[in-house]
Amino acid sequence: MVYIILISLTLGIAFGNFISPEMFKDIDKISTIALNLLIFSVGVDIGLNKEVLTKIKKKGVKILLVPLAVVIGSLFGGLIVGLIFKLQTNLALAISAGFGWYSLSAVILTNLAGAEAGTVAFLSNVFRELLAVLSIGFIASKINYITAIAPSGATAMDTTLPVISKFTDEETVVIAFLTGTILTFLVPFLVPFFYNI
Amino acid sequence: MYLIFLSLFLGIMVGAFLKLPDTIVKFNSKFQLAGLFLLIFTMGIKIGNDENIVKNIKLIGIKSFSFALFTALFSAIAVYIIYIKFLREE
């Protein structure tokens, strides 16, 4: 399964190198439609499973610890990268607070800190999404389902949710969606906040 | 983004309230697999087609990859700790 994901991704990248911008517009549309159909289909799975709600209720507000842990872990990881590459601490934290949402964090940081910082934010968060796609299966099978949500960050509510759904159970998918949604709402606040400290 | 909420909500309603025959349920899981590959394939196309990425990858690739790796890794460690301490069922 992980190999097929890797092959799909590599083929896509190779193919993307050769196509024209017009064709790309159509592919962007296809991608949006595919994503929403997939999310619908993931929703059907959740609806079919009658125990999900009871299980989630049992865990209650403790679920909110998952997005909190992703925030803390991401910022800590970014701090280390900042030290390794001798970057300004505020910039390193701001890049990390993109949580994989590359389009928005890149726009915000381009406006605040210039094109170079914006590009690093963009590429860092693109890589985070890729890393999530490639590591979810491994983490889900070798460690546990909940931990498999972590690399996705904000993308756990959209692009990486179908991958999480493939490798875990309905309960984890609901927690992942909640985690991704909370992180998505935090990005526009946290990126400028950390840049300005 | 609102489309995502709508898609998920409609999906949950269909799964919870319509009596879906087994063939549809089986088709649903096959559909997910096919859709997943299409999604990841188009994800790749977006990256391969983006000049900004192709052009900058040599210059800032290692730095950017380090950000991705360390943020993902420490997020996973933090969530793992939370799971062991608070969320694990006995």
Image (tube, grey):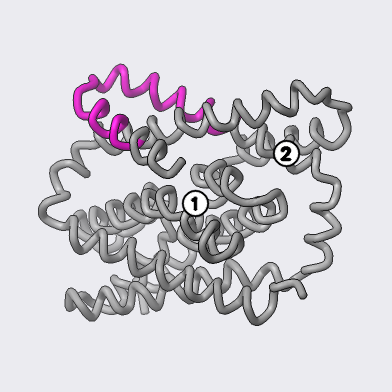
Q: Is residue B20 on the magenta stretch?
A: no
Q: Amino acid at mark 1?
A: Gly
Instruction: Using residue B87 as the reference point, say whether residue A92 is left or right of it.
Output: left
Instruction: Using residue B84 as the reference point, say whether residue A96 is left or right of it.
Output: left
Q: Is residue A172 above or below residue A39?
A: below
Which chain does the residue under circle 2 lie in? Answer: A
Q: Amino acid at mark 2?
A: Asp
Q: Residues within 10 Å of mark 2 (few under 14, many from 20)?
A: many
- Where residue A18 appears, as percent x and y from the top left, is 20, 23
Q: Which residue is disc 1 drawn over?
A: A137
Instruction: Using residue A8 as the reference point, say whether residue B7 is left or right of it.
Output: right
The tag earlier along the polypeptide, 2 or 1, is: 2
Q: Nearer the viewer, residue A91 or B83?
A: B83
The N terminus of chain B - image quarter: top right
Q: Is residue A15 on the magenta stretch?
A: yes
- The secondary structure that most of the magenta stretch takes on is helix
What is the quadrant of residue B63 in the picture? bottom left
Q: Please report the residue visible at 63 percent of the width from the left and 78 percent of the height from the top.
A: B84
Q: Which residue is disc 2 drawn over?
A: A45
- Where residue B32 appears, as percent x and y from the top left, is 59, 31
Could you tell me if residue A188 is visible in this image?
no
For mark 2, give the secondary structure.
helix
Residue B60, disc: none
Which chain does the residue under circle 1 lie in? Answer: A
Q: Residues within 10 Å of mark 1 (few under 14, many from 20)?
A: many
Closer to the observer: label 2 or label 1? 1
Q: Which residues are magenta?
A: A9-37
